[in-house]
Amino acid sequence: MKTCFFYLTIFLLAGTSALFSQQKSQGILAQLNQKLVNIQDRMQTDRADNVHLLSPEIFEDAVKYLQNAKENLNKGKDVKGIDEKLERASRALDMAERNAKEAKKQLPDLIQARDDALIANAPEYALDLYDDAEKRFYNAMKEIENNDINDAIKHGREGVGLFRQAELKAIKTSIIGNVHKLLQQAEDIKADKFAPLTLHKAQVLLREAENTLNSNRNAQATARQTAEQAEYQAKHAIYLANLVQQHKDDVKTWEQLILSWEESVDQVATELQIDPRFDSGPAEPLQAIQLAIQAVKQSKNELSNELAQKNTELAEQRQTIQKLSNELYKTKEQEAGLEAKLEAEKRQAEKIKRVEAMFNRNEAIVLREGPNLVLRLVGLSFPSGKSQIQAEYFGLLTKVQRAIREFDTAPIIIEGHTDALGHESANMRLSIDRANSVKSYLIANMGLNESRVRAVGFGKTHPVASNETEQGRRKNRRIDVVLEIGEASY
């Protein structure tokens, strides 16, 4: 039994070890795959930055190391060897990136000249020059890789010159190459004999376009425009030369040719409601056509001006309409606001009226003082020198609570006042204590937020009657409940 248990234990341990080894191997392969992907992404970024051009041989070494590692990984070869090749690829990229940075620093003119030649499509229009320039470019970059800056600069200067020549040739070929072909065609059919004036115009324009490019290769738009005129004159010369040669030996065909031209003029004249006569040559009908065209152009200008004026008037009318619409909208808003304000004032007046009806003249006087509603509690009194509220006044304070609920958001000030008898500081203290008593009572019985209610004491400083008589002093000994109702809100 012990022997069986021993072998079972050995078997389980062996299985666990194999599983652990398999998991470890899978983890290593995953790491290698991720490393390979990272290097591929880095190469793609480097290509976009032209590192493969600025350090060609070392970048190619990196590509070979990466490709070799990928093949070995797919074949399941030694993990250590694969990792070593990936490391070599990474180091080669490091070196290539440093070389590219140095090339941009030492040879910016060469790099720019190559870019400009490519933009001009030099590989198509100036292949020989471009190939020679590319060789100098490659040699310069190799010298950068060899850390030979002097030779790199030497090859760079040669490359710049060749690239610029290739660029100019490509520009000329693309812009004026077709003119040269047309002039050759004109020469083949002897246009210099049968249409010399038109041919000369084409030749002059061609030279002008070439001179423009020679003096400033960036003035391509101007040169292209001149070349297009030269191309037109060359085609015109070819047409005229062919036409003259066709009719030069046959007098009858000259008449047919002239009549066909007169017929073309007649068609245009008819459209302009002109009856042309050619018995004195084409000058008179052509002049009539010219005058008619000028009249049409003048009419067109007048119509355009009239249309512009109408559009201006229309725009002004639209602005006026918009302005009136805005004013109408504001008026409606004001009317709505006024109505809402009147309605709010009406509601507030009704509330004040209800509050006034709550008290008789022996309990409270309701006053409107600016934005405040004052409940002067003439029916509330305290024992001499005391601040406790007696039970007989709870009914009056219940009415005060009802009044407060009519204005359920208004801040409340409880003002305590005394007569002029007694010491000033004692009176001030007593007025504050009495105001606080009323404040505490209202908070306790209404559940008011304490921040909404404020108690202040004024002592004898705010009399409402003379302190010379007992009746006046009685009026001055009072509690005013001030509700800050403000203007009617809407």
Image (tube, rainbow, N blue to C red):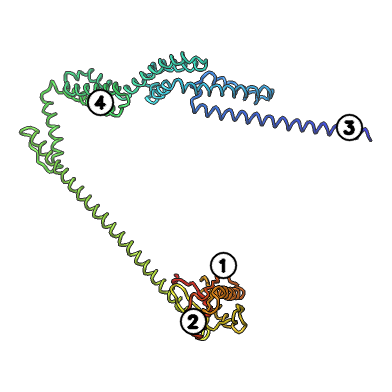
Q: Which residue was labeled with disc 4?
A: 231
SS state under label 1? helix
Residue 26 lies, with reference to residue 194, above or below; the image says below
Of the 4 image quadrants, the one containing the N terminus is: top right
User: Whole-Å distance between the Cαs marked 4 and 3?
Assistant: 99 Å
N-terminal of the pair, mark 2 or mark 4, is: 4
User: Whole-Å distance between the Cαs marked 3 and 2?
Assistant: 118 Å
Tell me the amino acid under the disc marked 3. Answer: Tyr
Residue at the image point whose x is 90% and y is 33% from the top: 6
SS state under label 2? loop
N-terminal of the pair, mark 1 or mark 3, is: 3
User: Whole-Å distance between the Cαs marked 1 and 3?
Assistant: 85 Å
Left or right: 490 in relation to 324: right
Tell me the amino acid under the disc marked 1. Answer: Ser
Query: Total of numbered circles in the picture?
Result: 4
SS state under label 4? helix
CB within 8 Å, label 1 to label 3: no
Q: Which mark is residue 451?
A: 1
Residue 444 lies, with reference to residue 131, above or below; the image says below
Of the 4 image quadrants, the one containing the C terminus is: bottom left
N-terminal of the pair, mark 1 or mark 2, is: 1
Instruction: Give the class, few, some or many, for how many residues have Cα within 10 Å of label 3's Cα (few <14, many ≥20).
Output: few
The percent coordinates of residue 170 (x first, y second) are: 35, 22
Q: Which mark is residue 7?
A: 3
Mark 2 or 4: in front is 2
User: Whole-Å distance between the Cαs marked 1 and 4?
Assistant: 92 Å
